């Protein structure tokens, strides 16, 4: 008979040090912070980030979880929940929010030519530009 190992781990708090948003095309690395007591467990487990219902693989080093955002799925909300999972199971005791934004598109730059010495104000116009 095979022996089964069962691990009971406490849920950890997950935080972010900045607003969580990214392009609807995905592919952006994000960093989440977790409580340090989970470090050893996480370094030997399959950890992932869960964007709404989509799970992506993640890595963890010194209480920092890193994962790449998946592309946004049309006909789904642009604001999704973000949690951390461990071996496919819930691991974070709180939920963060992640917002998919449309990729910015530049439509005009004025003036087109400027002096190499600098000091010229340049106006960039477009859609979905962030402040």
Image: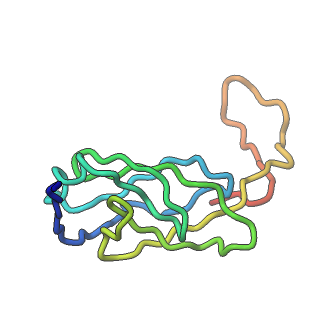
Q: Residue at x 17, y 63 (%)?
A: 7
Q: Work out whether 51 lies above or below 43.
A: below
Q: Residue at x 24, y 72 (%)?
A: 11
Examine the image and state in which quarter residue 36 appears. Answer: bottom left
Expressed as whole percent of the image width and height from the top left, the position of residue 73 reads: 69, 64
Q: Residue at x 72, y 60 (%)?
A: 102
For this view, does 74 lie left or right of residue 34?
Answer: right
The residue nearer to you, when weighing 105 against 31, is: 31
User: Furthest residue to the top?
Assistant: 116
Q: Work out whether 85 lies above or below 41.
A: below
Q: Residue at x 70, y 23 (%)?
A: 116
The quadrant of the picture occupied by the N terminus is bottom left
For this view, does 42 lie left or right of residue 52?
Answer: left
Q: Work out whether 65 lies above or below 81.
A: above
The residue nearer to you, when weighing 72 against 111, is: 72
The residue nearer to you, when weighing 78 against 56, is: 56
Expressed as whole percent of the image width and height from the top left, the position of residue 49 reads: 43, 59
The quadrant of the picture occupied by the C terminus is bottom right
For this view, does 78 lie left or right of residue 86?
Answer: right
Expressed as whole percent of the image width and height from the top left, the position of residue 97 reads: 48, 72
Expressed as whole percent of the image width and height from the top left, the position of residue 115 reads: 75, 26
């Amino acid at each position: 008979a095979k022996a089964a190992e069962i691990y009971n781990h406490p849920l950890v708090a997950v935080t972010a040090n900045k607003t969580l948003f990214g392009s609807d095309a995905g592919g952006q690395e994000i960093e989440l912070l977790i409580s340090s007591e989970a470090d050893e467990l996480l370094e030997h487990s399959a950890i992932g980030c869960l964007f709404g219902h989509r799970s992506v693989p993640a890595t963890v080093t010194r209480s920092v979880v890193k994962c790449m955002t998946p592309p946004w799925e049309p006909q789904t909300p642009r604001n999704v929940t973000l949690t951390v999972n461990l071996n496919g199971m819930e691991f974070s005791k709180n939920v963060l929010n992640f917002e998919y934004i449309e990729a910015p598109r530049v439509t005009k730059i004025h003036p087109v030519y400027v002096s190499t010495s600098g000091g010229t104000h340049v106006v960039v116009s477009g859609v979905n530009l962030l402040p």
